[in-house]
Image (cartoon, rainbow, N blue to C red):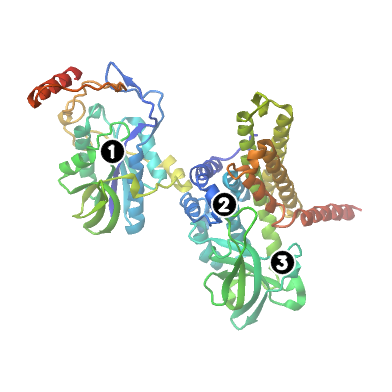
Amino acid sequence: MEYFLTEQQELIRSLARRVAEERILPLRAELDEKEEFPWAIMKDLADADLFRIFIPEKYDGLGEGVFTLCLAVEELSRACSGVAVTYASNALGAMPILLYGSDEQKQKYLPNIASGARLTAFGLTEPTAGSDAGGIRTTAIRDGDEYILNGTKHFITNGGEAEIYTVIALTDPSRGSRGASAFIVEKGTPGFTFGKKEKKMGIRTSATRELVFHNCHVPKENLLGREGSGFIVTMRTLDSTRPGVGAVAVGLAQGALEAAVAYAQQREQFGHPVSAIQAVQHMLANMAMELEAARALVYATAKTIDSGAKNISEIGAMAKVFATDMAMKVTTDAVQVFGGPGYMRDYPVEKMMRDAKINQIYEGTNQVLRNVIALELLKRKALRD
Amino acid sequence: MNIVVCIKQVPGTTDIKIDPETNTLVREGVESIVNPFDAYALEEGVRLKERCGGKVTAISMGPPQAEQALRETISLGADEAILLSDRAFAGSDTWATSYVLSKAISKIADYDVIICGRQTLDGDTGQVGPELAEMLEIPFVAYVSKIEEITEGYMKVQRMVEEGYEVIEMPLPAVITVVKEINVPRLPSIRGTMKSKTAEVPVWTAEDIGVDANKAGIAGSPTRVVKIFFPQRTHKSEMLQGNLEEQIDQLLEKLEEII
């Protein structure tokens, strides 16, 4: 499919592919097995300027948008979606600063994010607040020139490894979600520590950890946007980054499809390669069709967001749900094409299948996002009537 | 810290063919790459710059298409690249090459460290680094595996030897050749690649750098390649008979037959 990339986009995609093939592939199995954070690869990504993509040129970035970021995420995910998630979550953590930061805040944080010197993470989820983001309990109470944070965030991607955290907390607990605000909290701030490191089913190279705030004093300059805008910050951030999750899914499925095609041509049963069996061919054909459809939807959504469109909740949700359901199916079918060997850790497809599952769950479960899509449909109908 | 890195464009394959008429490598239709050992030299130069400030200048003597290899060095962190290209340089052996490089580096004048790869993939001699130092009359250390310290006018390096390494101090400017153990070269950066597409790569001719035409190219090359051939893989062995003197005579006779 021809997507008419610019020269710079082509270059970014080809460099991301080189990092993926030359630096990620040789380490993929080991990082998964040892559940080790991919620091060496983060350094390679930084050296290649890949952290600069979505940061404006004014702050030392390349001034590209969500679409170009998706191209890079997809290439990394084709090799290892654990690395791709780590990379994409950095964009997620930076997005609130990009969207709502003051010029001083941008000046202070974005150039270091662009160079890859400092990784970021986004802290929203709590034990009581998953799909129901309104259930957060972490508080940030104003005290003179500071806010005092108390509470625990969990399942935070890049937790413990990142240095800059954008954290959602209640500045006015009496107002519920309307009393939420967004803050920048730096690693090392007294009262900010890390709790349990999760042991996961997939994307095991990525770090998932608790953030613990105990009387953590954050200067008032670190408030993002205004008090009470925390949920708007969250929703707009997630709307902008959902195509990124879609891109993780597309890359993952691409890797699985390529592995399945190659294996089917090499595995012999009944005296010929299994690729000669029509049942297998049809599985491969379905995988390829659904993958191309998902890619087209993710790209179109990303480009729509880059165009500055306002109502992006619905299409963002569509791209994320469609692509991640597709990746779950394609990776499962890839294991099926491999047969018994596909279930073994000697081949990459079992990891891809494990990695795929989380994409249907995080950044809005595919169920809650279907609610979003349906709500928009019904709202539009009601408005027309 | 001004760092000069010498690079060479070489065929990017181990499947080489030799022209039996001219005894030279067949380069047509073979993809060209930056000599892999030079990539380590360039990376070390860029790391030195990141450590101490300054600039990295990549130079290469070669035909006009070597410009592509020089552009690649810019995408990998070199600040400037200079191509030394002139018909008078054609056919240079390592001695003549070192002479041309030394003249170009003398023109650059302001340099602290010159870094070369330990050898090239095609010629494989490992001679240019030491010859260059000799012609510039500055210190030289081969097989450097680590730069331990570097300050104004002083450098301490580790040199790989068969078992372990030696630590050597030297005044600057100096020439070093590096081994692959010294670093892991980075991949090109996006900004570097964009810059490399538009960067100016000046071409210096024999006249520009004051090269004496009799000392460059074939005229300035004492090396004569008599024959290049693929060694026959045979497992035949022959024991020489007689006393030591007789055996030496037989051996010399056999060697003369070969060449």
Element class at badge 1: loop
Q: Residue A265: percent from the left, percent from the top?
A: 62, 29
| Neighbours of disc 1 within 10 Å: few (<14), some (14-19), many (20+) | many
Subunit bearing disc 1:
B
Asked whether B97 or B213 is in front, the reply is B97
The answer to whether B76 is drawn above or below residue B241 in the figure is below
Q: Which mark is residue A32?
A: 2
Which residue is labeled 3 in the image?
Answer: A231
At a point 36% along the width and 25% down the height, the residue shown is B16
CB contact under 8 Å: marks 2 and 3: no
Q: Residue A234: percent from the left, percent from the top?
A: 69, 63
Q: Amino acid at mark 3?
A: Phe
CB contact under 8 Å: marks 3 and 1: no
Which residue is labeled 1 in the image?
Answer: B119
> Split into 4 quadrants, where in the image is the N terminus of chain A?
top right
Is residue A306 visible in the rendered image? The answer is no
The Cα–Cα distance between marks 2 and 1, rounded to whole angstroms, is 38 Å
Q: Residue B126: percent from the left, percent from the top?
A: 25, 37
The answer to whether A43 is drawn above or below residue A109 in the figure is above
The answer to whether A176 is drawn above or below residue B96 in the figure is below
The Cα–Cα distance between marks 3 and 1, rounded to whole angstroms, is 61 Å
CB contact under 8 Å: marks 2 and 1: no
Subunit bearing disc 2:
A
Q: How many marks?
A: 3
Q: Nearer the viewer, mark 2 or mark 3?
A: 2
